[in-house]
Structure formats: C-alpha cells, structure tokens
Amino acid sequence: MPRPAWSLYAYQLIEPDEQLDLFACQEIRVHLAARQLELGVPADRTLCGGLLPAQPRWSVVERAIYRDERLCTLCKAILDAQRHGMRPVWPQL
C-alpha cells in the first residue's frame, strides 16, 4: 500500500519545558515544526511562524494531537490546511 502524500510523520512536536524561551511563544503551548526543511521557509520557525526555542524538546506527533488543548491554534490550522492538500500561506517575517 503506498504511503499517503500527507502524514503526521512530516512534523515534529515542540514541547515547552519548565522555562519558556524568551524568543518563543510566551504561553504554555505545543507547536509543530516541519521535520524536513523546505526552500523559502525559515528553518528556525514553527509552522505558525514562531521562533524555535534555543533547545527545543522534540517529540513524535501522535494522532492524539488533535485533542490536545495545548496545541497552538495557528499550527493546527496550518496542519489542517496541509492535510487537505492546500499549501499554507506562510507568515511574512
């Protein structure tokens, strides 16, 4: 069976630690980042365009992510757009 073009495997979950990074989201949220770099997309940013923490704690993205209330709403919207085959409009940074 061929692997679908879209899959959660394409992403990694960034979990907050006990000290929020000064450059990242200031809320207790989990964010998604692309597993592989893409041309034209900043490599040091999450799906929603936020800066990555200095030392991110990476996790595999499980299907339960859709029920996690800590998931950044913009990351979720971009994930849903990509899931339905649409190319997201990346924030202009």
Image (cartoon, rainbow, N blue to C red):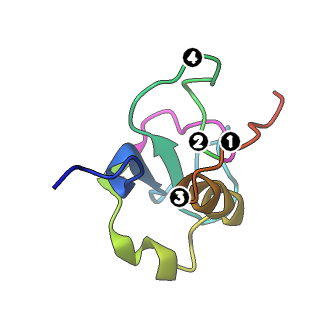
Mark 4 crowdedness (10 Å alpha carbons): few <14, some 14-19, many ≥20: few
Nearest to the eye among marks 2 and 3: give it.
Answer: 3
Give the percent coordinates (x, y) of residue 53: 53, 39
Mark 3 crowdedness (10 Å alpha carbons): few <14, some 14-19, many ≥20: some
Q: What element carries label 2?
A: loop
Give the percent coordinates (x, y) of residue 84: 58, 59
Amino acid type at image mark 1: Gly
Residue at (56, 27) in percent of width and height? 44
Whether 51 is among the magenta residues is yes
Dot 1 or dot 3, earlier in sequence = 1
Amino acid type at image mark 2: Thr
Label ID, residue 83: 3
Q: Is mark 1 on a helix, strand or loop?
A: loop
Nearest to the eye among marks 1 and 3: give it.
Answer: 3
Amino acid type at image mark 4: Leu
Residues rendered magenta in the picture: 48-57
Q: Is mark 4 on a helix, strand or loop?
A: loop
Nearest to the eye among marks 3 and 4: give it.
Answer: 3
Residue at (57, 80) in percent of width and height? 69
Label ID, residue 39: 4
Label ID, residue 46: 2
Q: Is residue 92 rendered to the left or right of residue 15? A: right
Dot 2 or dot 3, earlier in sequence = 2
Whether 73 is among the magenta residues is no
